[in-house]
Amino acid sequence: MFKRPDNWAELTWQQKRDLRLNKWISAEGTNFISKQAEKDYKARATRLAKATKMEKPDRVPCMIPTGWFPVKNAGVTLKEVMYDYELMKKVWLKFVDEFDSDTFDGTLFFQAQVNDLLEAKTQKWPGHGLPDDAHSYQYVEGVYMKADEYDLFMKDPFDFQLRRLLPRTMGVFEPFADVPSFSSYQGLPERLMMMCLDPRFQKLFKAIWEASKYLPAWWKASAETTQAAKTKGFPMFRGGMAVAPFDVFADSLRGTQGIVMDMFRQPEKIHEAMEFVLPQLLSGAIAMSDAADCPVVMMPLHKGDDAFMSDKQFETFYWPTFRRLLLGMVEEGLVPFPVAEGAYNRRLEYISDMPKSAVVWMFDQTNMANVKKTVGKVSCIAGNVPVSVAYTGTAKEMKEYCRKLIETCAPGGGYILTGGSTFDMANPDNLHAMMDAAREYGTYKKRK
Amino acid sequence: MPKTKEWAEMTWQEKRQERFNRWLNPPDVKFVSKEAEKLYKQRVTRFIKAIKLEEPDRVPVMLPTGNSPAHWGGSSFRELMYDYKKGHEIWKKFMAAFGDMDIFNGPGFIPCGRIAEVVRSKLQKLPGLGLPDDATMNQFVEGEYMMADEYDKYMLDPTDYNLRVMMPRTTPLFESFRKLPPFSAIMGNFWVSALADPDIRQTFETLMSLTEEQKKWTAASLEINQYIREHGYPSLWGGGIMAGAPFDHFADALRGTRGIASDMFRQPKKLLEAMERYLQWTIETNIKNLPLTASPICMMPLHKGDDTFMSDKQFAEFYWPTLRRLFLAMINEGLVPMPFAEGRYNNRLKQITDTPPSGVVWYFDQTDMKEAKRILGGICCIAGNVPSSVMITGTVQQVKDSCRRLIEDCAPGGGFILAGGASVDSGKIENFKAMMDAAKEYGVYKK
């Protein structure tokens, strides 16, 4: 848990960030398996911290975009791992022992038993809408908030969650859709009593209590795995997660079709609602990073991509609140780590409007030479070895690809070598080749 | 056949007529005889005409029988909290012994004792649970359950506030709800850990352990009311909502008298803002598009707007504007708000005239009915107000005289319902009969 010093309010954001990064690098209280592991951990974390601050580390840090690759690597199926957290732990630690990387990317965080019991409707997973041998799960976008529910979302948020959103997203919560609003206190105990008369509620609570056996076990297994990786010398470059205010609505609540209509039919409601979630996203990110004692906040971005909206829409809807969220995090000493899924070729100028070295931008399919010339001047950049190369290329091709990326992006510092997306089904040789490339081509020469 | 108009296109009178028709022709009631059906329709028609400020065949009567049948049958509120069957036998016998009544209801206001014991609310005392065993009524316990600085918290997320703050404060069984996380922390599977907390689990397990009892009580209550309807006695209640004045929501249940009196001086804007929000929610969630219910009449007990609780100026500023808009919203949905002005409304009469004619039924307790008729006549149907003192201690003749004066003052031209000023819990059956007789004797409208 990160503790702020008494003079916190007087510090600059850079000083706050340094305090947080140093705390992360120091890994106090970690029982490393060896002196070497401790040395490796600190070297890796320092390398990442320096790149973040656009300084020159000893060499380009490399984050192997692990994803669910450990599952393939262990010769088991995702389905098996999803239902067996002991197996999950084993599979991930096997990967840690066999593959070098500058980070540990975290474990699978899909809790199949819990999703089974709660009848999750927003996910498909192996055996539930996907074939048993599927190697990933799939988010199911939908209209989970209706066009006329923005006001309810803002004016009675708990009510919206309980009686509208949950029944639409989780089967066992369906009976809540038929319960009268709790926004008036009158007769509330009696209404709760009446609610429990519905046998579906008894089913709901049974499901919850059953699920509660699995959930803590999952969290525990996941935390233990991350901790074990840490003691072996692999830092996790992620303290929390956050999303762009626009994506809260576009991804999770209104869906693509819904949000597109809203941009034309009720733009002011989107703006109002984004303002509403902005402080919550910020305080959530701060709380997570404090708890994890790592200032890096990973932010997967979706609907701001080149193909989803026009420049004008990006400028109007996506960027302003997102930018303020980034600045809010920076001000608290956090390191926002947005991951621009898809292509951001048309967005580069907008997103360059940030304090220098405050953000780490990761790109998926964006042209990295252009990135280096624009965003790369103000922010550390990361990316973007394509999944295609990792899956179908030879080790030689992989190494070559990485070399070119390093030559384009590394000069001057502020670059992290990583994938455009996760390498779930990659050729194992290519993971090694990527690391080799970082070591061979990514070393910064010291000036004497 | 002409197509029925869409609901949204109907005038409020047309919507109300639809609801009246549903009341007149209840699809779920199988009358025991043609005679019972005829009487039922006559009785309902009598009320509908009075509400519409027309002259029915005679003045309709709401007998203030309340829980009196319990007393009449040699039982008590407390006993009937536990023995539903016994209550129903008594109510049936009372109904048979009485004969003609314009409305009648089962002992629905007597709660289920076993549940009340477990879900003990600090807001209410019951016979044997805070009140003497022989008490004839339940008692509301006012208090400062919402603090002066919590208006914002309440407005920011009312459901969150009700569940996580108010419930633990008012009902010990829900103490565990303090541990629920705020909505913003609850996403997806976080619900599992929130609801799986052992204390929260205990609360729900307790609630669920009571469902059998609750089912029995609910079934019994439905059964007795169904029995009463089938025998030709309508009910006035049936609007499906028990809404109150927005001011009372804060004054009664949340801030208490002392708290609200301070707020009117110290933070009037907050109070007005919160009432505005509450009004909007009530309209949005409870009133708009309310389906057809057993009857369109919504009984609304009013408290803190009474002559002695506040000044005329305060009434005009704090009480009436939101209450009036609540009435208008209900009227617009075809509902009939029937505010029950507990206490005295003499000073208020001139302040409550600005509602559409025949839209509201005012039910008065101790208000001067002659004045009420003078000021509200032609605007609102009025109901009232034989004093409980007369009903309980008076002779048959005194009851009849009291009713006669009321009828003479209020009935001319229609728009009057003869009623008690309050319910009587230990009345004499002959005095109820005297009231009924008075209506028949003095309340007939000449064709």
Image (cartoon, coloured by chain):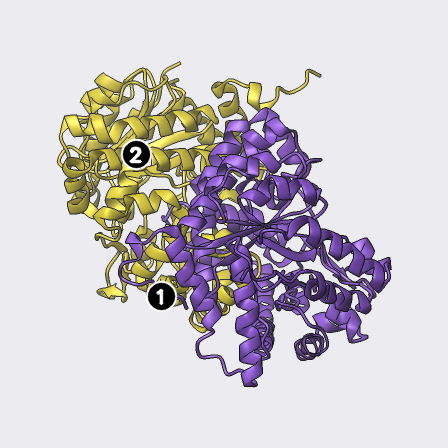
Chain colours: A purple, B yellow
Q: Quadrant of the N terminus of chain B?
A: top right
Q: Amino acid at mark 1?
A: Lys
Categorize mark 2 by other alpha carbons within 10 Å: few (<14), some (14-19), many (20+). some
Q: Position of residue B369 (x, y in %)?
A: 21, 26
Residue drawn 78% across the image and 73% down it: A73
Q: Residue furthest bottom?
A: A34
Residue A133, horizontal then vertical, whole percent: 83, 65
Q: Is residue B418 left or right of residue A338?
A: left
- Amino acid found under the numbered disc labelled 2: Glu
Q: Which one is closest to the eye, mark 2 or mark 1?
A: 1
| Residue at image mark 2 | B273
Please tell me in which quadrant of the rendered image residue A318 appears.
top right
Q: CA distance from mark 2 to mark 1?
A: 39 Å
Question: Which chain is mark 1 on?
Answer: A
Q: Position of residue B163 (x, y in %)?
A: 40, 55
**Picture quadrant of residue A110:** bottom right
Q: Which mark is residue A3?
A: 1
